[in-house]
Image (cartoon, grey):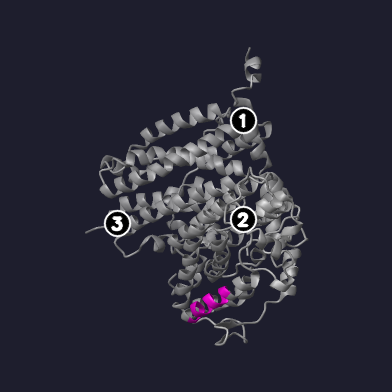
Amino acid sequence: MYAQVVEGSGKGAKATEDMTPEERAFQQKIDSGQKIEPKEWMPDGYRKTLIRQISQHAHSEVVGQLPEGNWITRAPTLERKAILLAKVQDEAGHGLYLYGAAETLGISRDEMYEQLHSGKAKYSSIFNYPTLNWADIGAIGWLVDGAAIMNQVALQRTSYGPYSRAMIRICKEESFHQRQGYDIMMKMCNGTEAQKAMAQDAMNRFWWPALMMFGPPDADSVHSAESMAWKIKINTNDELRQKFVDQTVPQAEYLGLTIPDENLAWNEEKGSYDFTDPDWDEFFQVISGNGPCNADRMRARVRAWDDGEWFRDGLSAYAEKHSAGNTNQGVENV
Amino acid sequence: MKADSDLFEFLLRMGDNTLVLGHRVSEWCGHSPVLEEDIALANVALDLIGQTRMWLDFAGDVEGKGRDADALAFRRDVWDFRNILLVERPNGNFGDTLMRQFLFDAWYHAILSRLAGSSDDRIAAIAAKAVKEAAYHLERSADLVVRLGDGTTESHAKMQAALDDFWPYTGEMFAADTIDTSLTSRGVIPNLAEVRDEWDETVNRVLADATLEIPDGTYQHKGGKQGTHTEHLGHILTEMQFLQRAYPDASW
């Protein structure tokens, strides 16, 4: 997901009898479905985990501009170019709401950027894969946004008010993103042999990274129990992954694309598909910095930030000079 | 009926300006100095590409050879493009991009607000729609030029350097050729001298607020409107037209 490996306090969910009265009241509130709002008391671990999760999500939206931005200048028609611009603009907007939601927990956007640029904060592994042909733009909308929606729809019910409200806004736009991705895939799959080959190539490269978006298997996901008790995570990684596979296989069949998994088969008994686990070694390599594009993505973001310093400083200096309370100018003019 | 070649040329000039500038602006996607600017620039590029479709679709209809906006955008070579040289200049630093945008917006807004009263109904309709977007673009680019010009010593120096660089590319916006004068006499487009007056007024006011000085040199480059471009346009087209050129039989 956009927040794949969010470290918790490392202690797992607390048993009710181990809770302080404040913690117990907090948990009861969550259990009864009430939202937690910024000014209310919350356990430190809840605050920290949420900051990690929301900022990972925000960073993913921001870094996620890069692989799609890679094709804006090469989009094949004016309409496709306009749609892609609108989509990438939405993503930057999602980043903005999410940074805003994280800021309500007492961290500034600059601090979050600092964590991203220093490598301390993570973003979704998916954006460390390259976009190599135009069908990749379709595959990102269809598979990547499709996977993201699975999680985000559930997160509309998350316990933290500002995060939940951000998700509600984001989900409305994400479903348009997924549709435009599928629309590109339809066009490619009904197109020339070269276009079909591009679509299959995109499928082959994006299938496994899309499955990895849901994070490691539940058995290895040490932080899940606590996050689920706090309702900052709603479904387990494996549940969502299964749901994604079940939803996507018929869509791929309709497109005439082959999913690159020999073991993919309908399991009548469990009423869902069996499929091969992605290569988790690759996943951990990518999130620890060794994916195909990690260095390029970070270099682009750090350069944008560093090159923009004079711009931000210029705006601040102007605001300072022209603020109502500033009398320096008056003095100089005397 | 013989195609109205003057009108066709004029529509290409409008559509190619927005197409090429939209392309340049979109190159910033994900790389701008703050997230709000990423959003704003994507929005500007989106407006420009949307306007391109209106101008070039109309151009294709006037030409009457069955070409639509995509055919014109993706299947013409450099010498058939009619944009002014200013819009194909490279992005440079963020200040360069903003200065180029401001100098263009001030002209584009001034001409659109007059084209909204064009004797050609379709031009009037396109302009009436586009002028609203252009007003917002101008407000934004002018505001940032002022803030950065009157910001730090460094931001001032960068904006002055940007102005010095782009100034010799502004005259082309007002250099009327026989196509312009003929269309002006038909009431299709305004007199470019009038557009210049409004542009001068806007630019002088904004640059004064920005504490920037208009360069002394009077030399002005031109040629883009007639199809003689800088080396940059070929590279823009190489990138922009790649898929349509590499896969001419495909539909996207």
Looking at the rendered structure, the kind of residue marked 2 is: Ile
Closer to the camera: disc 1 or disc 3?
1
Query: Percent from the top left, x then y, of residue A44?
Result: 73, 50
User: Secondary structure under badge 3?
Assistant: helix
| Observer-nearest of B158 and A107 | A107
User: Mark 1, residues whose alpha carbon is within 10 Å: few (<14), some, or many (≥20)?
Assistant: some
- Residue pointed to by mark 1: A318
Residue visible at 56% across and 58% down in the picture? A157
User: Secondary structure under badge 2?
Assistant: helix
Query: Percent from the top left, x then y, of residue B26?
Result: 53, 53
Return the residue found at the far left. Answer: B1
- Residue pointed to by mark 3: B62
| Observer-nearest of A67 and B101 | A67
Segment colored magenta: A243-253
Separation of marks 1 and 2 at Cα, in angstroms: 45 Å
- Residue pointed to by mark 2: A30
Query: Percent from the top left, x then y, of residue A87?
Result: 51, 58
